Amino acid sequence: MKILSYLALSIAAMLPLSSAAQSTRQFTATRANEYALVYSLPTTAVDITIETEHVHRVPGEFHNYARRHLAITDAITEESTTVSVRSITIATRGIADTSNQWQVQFKNGSGVTMLLTADGRPLTINTEEVAEQAQPELPTAQAAAPTPLETEAARQAMTQDMVRSSSVSKRAELAAQRIFELRDMRSDLLSGQSDNPPADGQAMQLVLDNLAGQEAALTAMFAGTEQRYTNVRTISFVPDSDEVDRQVIARISPYEGILEADNLAGAPLSLSVQILETGSLPLTDKGEPKRFPTNGVAYVIPGTARISVQYEGRTIAQADVTLAQLGCVFGIDPGLFTDKKAPATLQFDPTTGAIVQLAQ
């Protein structure tokens, strides 16, 4: 199986149909085009959207004194970044197959209309109501939240004695003392023993939040900080009619995130394609394949495949998808769409070229 794949830095390639429908073109069979309309049936592309979670840990300035002053036994002692796969989303979309282009000749004066996508795939005939296509919800990249040391409260927590001292040991001792002072202040406020209590509940909450922010900042100087953020990238490929067994499409580095498939610095993320069913032509009453109607409106009878993604020896995502390239092409009598009394309407699946609804 040949796979055309690429790493995408964003998920812009994965447009829901509602967005794609904004870039449609409508054509009418008229004398100017000799009552002939041209379109391309689709090939189905598969998009694998990878969401990775990155955890960045930084030791605090006083990590060597964490156990002594605050009894913290799990303080961060070395800076590190780790990456893990958080989610995998499998989706499909149609792309025009210019080698599978069709021209339909309609009856003179028929006025048949056809709605096409921007790249020439068929959406509808004789109607502007496009079939709804369900799309999986895609993750979005989440930036890291500020650490306790990056807040305004952190600046307020630093006393003049801490700033002036040139001894790390002394600064750690002063910071620990300040933490206990802040705890006592909060306890006094909550118990009503404060000499200068806030005027109302809102003011009380502001003071408590500020005290908590200062304590968190000073504690982080001992325990260290941890930031979490996510990245999202999409790998797209166009399968053909062969099965695939664990083909490496990318690699995941525990330090750098998603890498190219040939970069051995990461563990392989592989993809398998199992063909479940191939599309077949409809049969006559005698069990023989029907003939393509003369000058028929071509559509696809697609097949299905199971797409699975493996990582670290296990399958982490799996989906059964419909693929145009596992099917065959058949046609509809164009006369159905030129009936003066009740012209038929047709909705195509723009991802596979299949019939969604034929109504008359």
Image: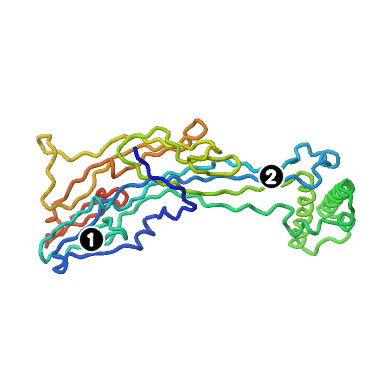
Q: Which mark is residue 114?
A: 1
Q: Residues within 10 Å of mark 2 (few under 14, many from 20)?
A: some
Q: Amino acid at mark 1?
A: Met
237 up-or-down from 347: above or below: above
**Among the 4 quarters of the image, the one containing residue 239:** top left
Residue 118 lies left or right of residue 72; in this view the side is left
Name the residue tied to disc 2: 57
Between 253 and 130, the one nearer to me in the picture: 253
Residue furthest out toward the top: 313
Where is residue 275? Give x, y as percent.
Answer: 32, 35
87 up-or-down from 160: above or below: above
70 up-or-down from 123: above or below: above
Q: What SS does tag 2 mark?
A: strand
Residue 269 lies left or right of residue 97; in this view the side is right
Q: Residue placed at 31% from the left, 39% from the top?
A: 304
| Alpha carbon separation for disc pair 1 and 2 | 57 Å
Between 205 and 143, the one nearer to me in the picture: 143
